[in-house]
Amino acid sequence: MSSFEDICGQENIKTYLTEAISTGKLSHAYIFNGESGSGKKLLADAFAETLQCEHVEELVKSGNAKAEDIKPCGKCHSCIQAEAGSNPDIIRISCDADAKKSIGVDDIREKLINDIVIKPYEYDRKVYIVEDAQRLTAQAQNALLKTLEEPPEYAVIILLATNADILLDTIRSRCVVIDMEDVPGELMKTYLQEHFPDKSESEIEFAVIFADGKLGRATDYLSNADMEELKDSVIRFVKKVPDMALYETMTQLRELDSYKINRLEDYLDILQLWYRDVLMFKSTRDMNSLVFKSEITDISRQAQNASYEGLNKIIEGVEVIKLRLAANVNFDIAAELFLITIHEGMVNCLSEAHERD
């Protein structure tokens, strides 16, 4: 069962939603906006299950509801169904695993627009959770617009988006937009230590830094055995780059290609952390501020030889390839340009350093 109490962080959002339920001042539509791993799906599940809980419903109708009392009981028929994923009035709309696929007008008509006019099957409300709403086509959003303008009083629609700015202004203006909060580092560290007692201190610390405030990314990193190999793959590559010819650098394209389906963003983020370490050490000579402390020998060598301009170009290059990939630019072209940037940033800087000597 999903409950607000089980969600780490997001205190302001949880308070806002529980107060909305307790006072009956609910919007008909919300956008939960946040990067992957920010917890928006877990929050939406908790919100939906709380809305449908029969105990909560009775409490609100009694007029004695307080925000701190708003939580699913876990015992009523609705909660039991929600736990089993079979509550007929909590409708989850998601597309296939193909991250490039958009959500078209036929999808949204069939799964939401045509269904929402049917009254709830068992409870007072119908709650719709639309995952990856940023993938809605313009036609699908325009079709949804009329429903948002004149929704049935029993309906609550929750759009989950990694970037709400992609949605049409007319969609955003008819929804309450809730931006997910970053989970503070110390709070995340405590949570991970409690839930991953078998992980070392260094593994926990890396997961916290890697997650950048997104608890879901941290738990995914620690839960997935492949992530350690991915990190090792990045480290092997960045250690070799200064001594590689351009054509050798380009052989890395094949390895990047193997990650592009599920883990390319993670690969790029770890790569970026490495070069930020190099830049940080070049600026401060402070080993304590590094993420990859155990790799100080290679980081120190690269920091000594690389220029600030070259390192900044690499770090900026990571952001550029992320944007290009998000815009569905051809993967091979984007990756090739990025690898050239890395080569120029490190290898050319080494050449300049040797010339100065």
Image (cartoon, grey):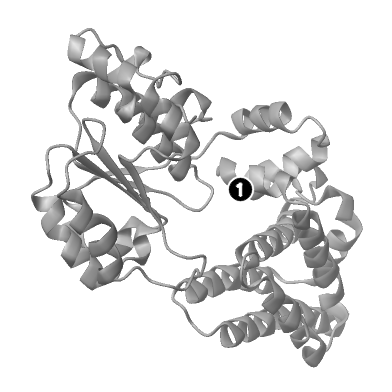
Residue 103 coordinates in the image, percent (x, y): 34, 68
Question: Closest to the observer: 27 or 51?
Answer: 51
Residue 126, relative to residue 297: is it above or below? above
> The C terminus lies in which quarter of the figure?
bottom right
Q: Is residue 248 above or below residue 287?
A: below
Element at label 1:
helix
Image position of 34 with respect to 154: above or below: below
Q: Is residue 319 visible?
A: yes
Residue type at the position of mark 1: Arg
Give the camera-side residue of 254 and 125: 125
Q: Residue furthest bottom?
A: 247
**Residue appearing at x 42%, y 32% in the figure:** 81
Residue shown at the point (49%, 36%) measured from the top left: 84
Q: Is residue 90 left or right of residue 26?
A: right
Residue shown at the point (81%, 40%) measured from the top left: 202
Q: Position of residue 132 (x, y in %)?
A: 40, 58
Q: Position of residue 70 (x, y in %)?
A: 35, 18
* Res 17 → quadrant: top left
Seen at 80% across and 54% down, the residue is 228
Is residue 169 or residue 294 the one in the foreground? 169
Please give the residue where the numbered disc 1 appears in the rendered image: 217
Q: Residue furthest right?
A: 297
Depth order, front residue of 98/111? 111
Image-quadrant location for residue 356? bottom right
